[in-house]
Structures are given as C-alpha cells and as structure tokens.
Amino acid sequence: MKILVLRGGALGDFLLTLPAVAGLREKWPEAEIEMVVGKKFGELVVGEGAIQAVRPIDQPGLASFYARAGKLDAEWSDYFTEFDLTISYLFDPDEIFFTNWKRAGGTGEYISHDPRNPKEAAWKHLAQPVQRLGGSVGDSRRLFGEKIKGVKKTQKRKPSWVIHAGSGGSKKNWPIQSWVQEMEVLAQKHDFAITWLAGEAELGLEGELPEIWKRGDHACVQNLTLPEVFHQLQSSDLYLGHDSGISHLAGWSGAKCGILFGVTDPAVWSPLGERVKCWSRGGRWPEPGEWAEWVDRMI
C-alpha cells in the first residue's frame, strides 16, 4: 500500500493535517506514506514509522496540473502513477487538478477535500477523508521525524519561557509593547528567562524589544530551522504565542502552551495538545494586566 497526501498552505495548515495522516498510518501501519507539502515541513516528519518522503509542493512542473488541457509535466505525471491512494487538500473547485491527475495516469483511489472554512475544529474537518475510509483520527506525535526525536532537557538556572509574538497575519498579532508590559508584571512574581523567537515575518522584533529583555538571561533568536525551533519549544517550561504556525508546533511538541487569540476562533484554530490552553474574548485583545493575570493562573 502506497499513499500520497497533497497539502498546500503554511506551517499551521500542515500541522493541523497531521492527525489525519496519523490516522492513515494507524489504519495501514505497513503502508508507505509520502506527502507533497512545503519543503521545510519534511524535516519534521520524515523518518522510520512516520513519513517515508516529502516532495516540495513548489517543485517545478506541478503548476501544469492547474491549467486546463495543458501539457503536463512528465516527472510529476510519472510520480502520480505510483500510489494506491491519493488524498488531496488542494483547492480544486472545478476539478482541474483532478482531471489532469487522471489524464497523467494517476492510479488508485483519489479523494479531494476542501480544507477551507471549517465549521468545527480544523483538525477534525481535515480528518474527514480518513473517516470516510473507515479510519479514525490518529495521534500526530507518532509522526515525529528523525530530526526532532530524542530531545534532551538540560539543566537551567531559571524556568525557560519561549515567546513567539508574531504570526503570518498582522491582524492576529498583539503589539510587542503590550507583550513587554505584561512580562514586566509577571516578572514581579516569577523568575524566568525568555527566549523570543523571530522568523521571516518578525524581522524587526529585536529592534523593538527593550535592551533589558534581550540580554542577560533573556535572548532573541531569529531564523532557526524548524527542527531547531521544535527543540527550543519542547525543552521549554512554558510557551506563549498567538494563533500561529509556531504555536501549533509548540502544541505538537508537547510544550505547556498559553495561546493568545484575538480575531480568530480557538474553537476552530486552537493547536492540538494536552497542555494547550487558549485565551479568547470574542475578538478583543486583553486589557492591561489581564494577560499577565491569566498566565499567572495558568502556571
């Protein structure tokens, strides 16, 4: 049995799909499972007993499958003939991709599922194809790849907090000045060391942080690889962040998480994880001191 899962989107979209993929792994434990996703995401899941291979979704040639009646890329055409089951989460309302998949000689069963606008928890919505196949939602932690297995906790002088005060969408971000103010309140009661995570979307973060919050016990780190970020999260004592891909990664890692939701709905978009708690007030941001009080109760 050989299975292919196609999934576009950002890191959070990918991670929310993993319970479905884990369900495939649990239903067919001996199957070879491959994914067509963002190239960087493969570093998280490729390994024995997890995902056998990842092909980058931006690899040249796949775009030909989105054009009606065009010339199809030969390499991708050959690739699609290898699988017994293909599950596509690509947006394909006119079935152009599916038609071209068949025209290229795609084999086995093909299931297309629209990932947009879920009316329930997103991970449940994305697991519907697996349930139609007689499977169930799986434990996505069984898909830990070789590059992220075996993280060892190190001795630390102070509790380690990791904060990602960004996301891919600016409307989902609380101002960094508000984060700093709340950390100042929490520092009156708790002793901790903060690692501020910054990626491509937070290039100016270090310049916005007051000097006292990025030296000594505190640090700002930028543009780590996803396995490096995963290790930071899994070894932390507490993670705090917005509705973002990194927050989903934190939940998946098993870290203790406090997620701050503004305009988005945690009933739909909350990260999975037994240690994940979400703050939400129907679209508004916390009043001064409110986030610090909530975090204080959580820890």
Image: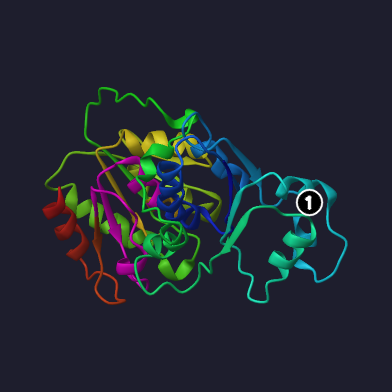
Q: Residue at x 62, y 44 (%)?
A: 39
Which residue range is magenta in the image?
248-276
Q: Does the magenta stretch include residue 26?
A: no
Please, what secondary structure does the residue beneath circle 1 have? helix
Which quadrant of the figure has residue 152? top left
Q: In this view, does 198 lie to the left or right of 296?
A: right
Q: Position of residue 260 (x, y in %)?
A: 30, 61
Q: Which amino acid does label 1 sit on?
A: Ser
Q: Residue at x 36, y 53 (%)?
A: 137
Q: How many labels were placed on the picture?
A: 1
Q: Position of residue 66 (x, y in %)?
A: 75, 66
Which quadrant of the figure has residue 271? bottom left
Residue found farthest to the right: 71
Location of residue 68 with respect to 168 vertically, above or below: below
Figure quadrant of the N terminus: top right
Q: Does the magenta stretch include residue 265?
A: yes
Q: Callout 1 environment at 10 Å: few (<14), some (14 to 19), or many (20+)?
A: many
Q: Where is residue 14 in the image (x, y as percent from the top left)?
A: 50, 53
Way the structure is coloured:
rainbow
Q: Is residue 72 left or right of residue 6?
A: right
The front one of 91 and 198 is 91
Task: Give the labeled residue for mark 1.
Answer: 77
Q: Can residue 37 be seen in this view?
A: no
Q: Residue at x 43, y 36 (%)?
A: 144
Q: Where is residue 238 in the image (x, y as percent from the top left)?
A: 25, 43
The front one of 52 and 279 is 52
Location of residue 110 with respect to 39 vertically, above or below: below
Q: Is residue 61 visible?
A: yes
Q: Which residue is drawn at 18% across and 51% down?
A: 186
